[in-house]
Image: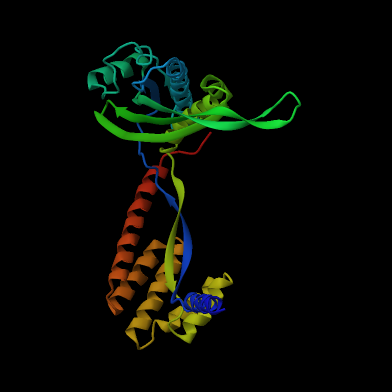
């Protein structure tokens, strides 16, 4: 009984702490600039694929050899799917006049010296001249490492009487680690515009009366690996596009009765009435209270995507009462202003989908 009473007390205290919190969170949706910026002179691009690398376990039983052969084929299919995914993404980008799939480096699959090294500018320029393109998107490499584990287990099986019974079995698990790297070459400026690596993991498991039967029982592994490759290519192409992002800010709600009244308005979605109350509190003789009201108005203006006004209110808050918290917020706003400038420069070029 005493233990139950203590739990009730702790729960009650927790409710009090939460209800007495001095701040609340507000989520702000932002549009972030594309991670990759391209020159507006790049209108024709080529795509090439790199060599497939497979890491094999030292133990090479018949089962491992079978899996290795399957992995070799799957890796090539996934690599090709990734290139196709990128091609589809770039085709939908109105900035580009032409997208060309170039086979030059894909065909040297048997070349042992092609290990995903950087292309020389001589090679890049020669490829661009040959195909009349302005830049090259390259899948530099596709690495795949599959680890095989076996263990004894049991499984249900129908006996001669069509009744399920437990029988000895083997369980196989294939853990496939995939890494592929992408690069964009701009030969005119001899600039490596972007370099990015994707890492993914696909785990497949199944049971069978013996290891080979267990391997055959694995479903959708091939489909998952190829689909993952396609998504990787599409995701890399999406790095050329702005994207939505949500950030969380705090605002003050428990400083004075007026703040509490303003909180009620924010909870009902009426931020403008809350702003009127905060503006009154900016004249509060207590500089800490006044500064928090200014800070709340800064957050409100950021929420309304008015970064100039948000910065003015944030600086005013920090002037009234210097705080590391306010200073950090000013730095965050400065970063957002820089990001907006970059976004505006990117949007000066047509980047909408066809």
Residue 203: percent from left, percent from top? 48, 33
- Foreground pick, 133 / 325: 325
- The relative height of residue 172 versus residue 351 in the rendered view (above or below) is above
- Asked whether the viewer can see residue 127, the reply is yes
- The relative height of residue 188 versus residue 111 in the rendered view (above or below) is below
Pick the quarter of the image with the N terminus.
bottom right
Residue 154: percent from left, percent from top? 58, 32
Residue 291: percent from left, percent from top? 35, 78
Residue 188: percent from left, percent from top? 27, 27
Numbered marks: total: 0
- Asked whether the viewer can see residue 220, the reply is no
- Coloring applied to the structure: rainbow
Q: In which image quadrant can residue 130 be found? A: top left
**What's the residue at 50%, 81% (across, down)?**
260
**What's the residue at 28%, 13% (across, down)?**
112
**What's the residue at 37%, 31% (across, down)?**
179
- Foreground pick, 215 / 274: 215
- The relative height of residue 322 versus residue 67 in the rendered view (above or below) is below
**What's the residue at 30%, 23% (across, down)?**
116
- Foreground pick, 30 / 24: 24
Q: In which image quadrant can residue 86 be found? A: top left
Q: Residue furthest bottom?
A: 285
On screen, residue 231 versus residue 116, left or right, reads: right
């Amino acid at each position: 009984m005493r233990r139950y009473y203590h739990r009730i007390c702790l729960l009650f205290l927790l409710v009090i702490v939460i209800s007495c919190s001095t701040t609340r969170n507000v989520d702000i949706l932002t549009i972030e600039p594309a991670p990759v910026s391209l020159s507006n002179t790049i209108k024709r691009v080529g795509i090439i694929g790199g060599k497939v690398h497979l890491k094999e376990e030292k133990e090479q039983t018949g089962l491992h050899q079978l899996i290795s052969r399957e992995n070799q084929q799957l890796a090539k299919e996934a690599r090709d799917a990734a290139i196709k995914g990128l091609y589809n993404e770039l085709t939908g980008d109105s900035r580009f006049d032409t997208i060309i799939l170039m086979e030059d480096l894909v065909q040297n699959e048997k070349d042992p010296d092609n290990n995903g090294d950087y292309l020389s500018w001589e090679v890049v320029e020669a490829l661009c001249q040959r195909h009349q393109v302005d830049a090259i998107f390259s899948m530099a490499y596709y690495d795949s490492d599959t680890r095989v584990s076996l263990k004894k287990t049991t499984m249900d099986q129908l006996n001669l009487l069509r009744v399920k019974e437990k029988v000895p079995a083997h369980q196989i698990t294939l853990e496939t680690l995939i890494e592929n790297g992408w690069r964009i070459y701009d030969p005119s400026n001899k600039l490596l515009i972007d370099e990015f690596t994707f890492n993914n993991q696909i785990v497949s498991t199944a049971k069978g009366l013996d290891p080979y039967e267990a391997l055959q029982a694995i479903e959708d592994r091939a489909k998952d690996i190829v689909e993952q490759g396609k998504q990787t290519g599409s995701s890399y192409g999406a790095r050329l596009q702005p994207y939505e992002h949500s950030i969380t800010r705090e605002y003050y709600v428990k400083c004075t009765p007026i703040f509490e009244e303003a909180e009620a308005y924010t909870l009902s979605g009426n931020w403008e009435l809350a702003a009127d109350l905060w503006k009154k509190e900016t004249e509060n003789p207590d500089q800490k209270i006044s500064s928090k009201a200014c800070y709340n108005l800064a957050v409100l203006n950021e929420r309304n995507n008015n970064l100039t006004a948000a910065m003015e209110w944030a600086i005013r808050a920090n002037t009234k009462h210097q705080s590391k918290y306010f200073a950090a917020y000013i730095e965050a706003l400065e970063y957002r202003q820089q990001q907006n400038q970059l976004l505006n420069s990117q949007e000066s070029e047509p980047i909408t989908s066809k």
